[in-house]
Image (cartoon, helix red, strand yellow):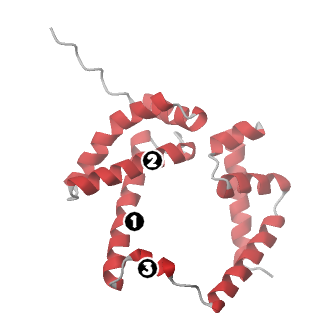
Amino acid sequence: MTALASPPPDADALAALITQVAETRDRQAYAALFKHFAPRIMAYLRRGGMGAGEAEELTQEVMLTLWRKAGYFDPLRAGAATWLFAIVRNARIDRARRRRDATLSGAPPLEEADAAPSAESMSLVTEREAQLRSALNSLSPEQKEIVQLSFFSDTPHAAIASKLNLPLGTVKSRVRLAIAKLRILLEDPS
């Protein structure tokens, strides 16, 4: 008599595993997610016409993104599979764009990064950085702290909520309000 394979986790279990990865960096939860999703992602990419090696590489990239960005998952907005396959879709599009850009320019993409920026572009970057610093300083201290943690430290929202002892919804709304305010200030710096 052979042992039956365990049934795949349901949507709620998958969402719980992603939340567990986000909050505690649980490697066993991540391994379960990898075991469930990696073959499905690979099959999806292969059906889309991608070669085996490239599909495997992109699958690894997506699963690494899941590990790093699990804190951005919101089970109230989308299911685990929907969220992850949106990442797959975006990664596939980004890869195609990089390939197309390299083909159109006729030069490997890395050579472009080696070119020294012009004085004009350096001046524009410096000016834009000053505008951003000024806009950040106009935020409330709570919003500024959350923006710095979220965008400059790449801290997941769940970890920020835990660190600041705030509800996750409060963290998300402060980020959203801060970004809206920054957008207004940066579009009209007067």
Residue drawn where x is 39% and y is 59% of the image: 91
In the visual, does 137 lie left or right of 50?
right
Amino acid on which the number 1 mark rests in the picture: Asp
Q: Are marks 2 and 3 in contact (CB under 8 Å)?
A: no
| Crowd around label 3: few <14 · some 14–19 · many ≥20 (10 Å) | few
Please report contact status of discs 1 and 3: CB closer than 8 Å, yes or no.
no
**Element under disc 2:** helix
Mark 2 vs mark 3, CA separation in Å: 26 Å
Q: Residue at the spot x=73%, y=56% of the render? A: 148
Depth check, mark 2 against mark 1: the one in front is 2
**Which residue was labeled with disc 2?**
64
Amino acid of disc 2: Leu
- Asked if residue 116 is positioned above or below residue 152 in the image, the reply reads below
**In this rendering, which labeled residue sits more in front, label 1 or label 3?**
3
Residue shown at 42% from the left, 53% from the top = 87
Q: Nearer the viewer, residue 80 or 119?
A: 119
Query: Looking at the picture, how far across and down is residue 111, in whole percent?
Result: 43, 79
Callout 1: SS:
helix
> Badge 3 is on which residue?
111
In this rendered view, identify the residue nearer to me: 158 or 170: 158
